[in-house]
Image (cartoon, rainbow, N blue to C red):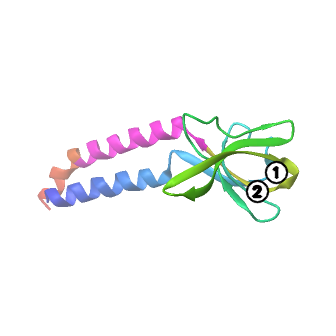
Amino acid sequence: MLQDKKSTITLICFIFHLYGCSQSLEITKDQVEEYKDYEIKSIVTNEDREYKFEKSDLYPEPEIKDSLLLGWVKESFEKNVYIIKELKIPISQIKTLNVEKFDANKMGLIFILSIAAVVVMVLIGPLFAFM
């Protein structure tokens, strides 16, 4: 019976986790202004070349300034070392952007719902022991 309770609690917490704490979207260059508070993760150019931005304390996050996207990307891999370069690309040359936003409110809700699910299972678990 204890194993069933643990499995149920784990399953409920996993379902809440799948609900997610961040939102990822693929947007076009025309939608950039709508999602300006989202973090740019990667882009695809009009020539179908993909650039993934490097996340690090050493490099600033990608940003758009004066119709130009600025960011840091991995360029190549040589002798077990990545070469990082600054990318400057006009917005007009971008087909799509992958953006992401962390949602602290959603994370708090998921945490509260997970705790509530555990409490409910602990409280009603003994009722099923007699069935």
**Amino acid identity at mark 1:** Lys
Pointer 2 residue = 96
Q: Please, what secondary structure does the residue beneath circle 2 have?
A: strand
Q: Look at the magenta stretch and give its main secondary structure.
A: helix
The label number, if any, that marks residue 4 in the structure image? none
* Residue 106 within the segment the image draws in magenta: yes
Percent x, y of residue 39: 65, 41
Q: Residue at x 46, y 36 (%)?
A: 108
Q: Which of the two residues, 101 or 54, is positioned nearer the viewer here?
A: 54
Q: Which residues are magenta?
A: 101-121
Q: Alpha-carbon neighbours of circle 1 within 10 Å: few (<14), some, or many (≥20)?
A: some
Percent x, y of residue 95: 80, 58
Quarter where residue 120 is shown: top left
Q: Please, what secondary structure does the residue beneath circle 1 have?
A: helix
Question: Would you say residue 39 is visible in this rendering?
Answer: yes
Q: Which of the two residues, 14 or 49, is positioned nearer the viewer here?
A: 49
Instruction: Specify the farthest residue to the front.
Output: 79
Q: Residue at x 64, y 34 (%)?
A: 60
Q: CA distance from mark 2 to mark 1?
A: 6 Å
From the viewer's perspective, is residue 67 above or below residue 9? above
* Residue 61 within the segment the image draws in magenta: no
- C-beta proximity under 8 Å, tags 2 and 1: yes
In the displayed structure image, the side of residue 131 where residue 85 appears, left or right: right
Instruction: Specify the farthest residue to the left.
Output: 130
Pointer 1 residue = 29
Q: Which of the two residues, 25 or 3, is positioned nearer the viewer here?
A: 25
**Amino acid identity at mark 2:** Thr
Q: Residue at x 51, y 40 (%)?
A: 106
Percent x, y of residue 11: 33, 58
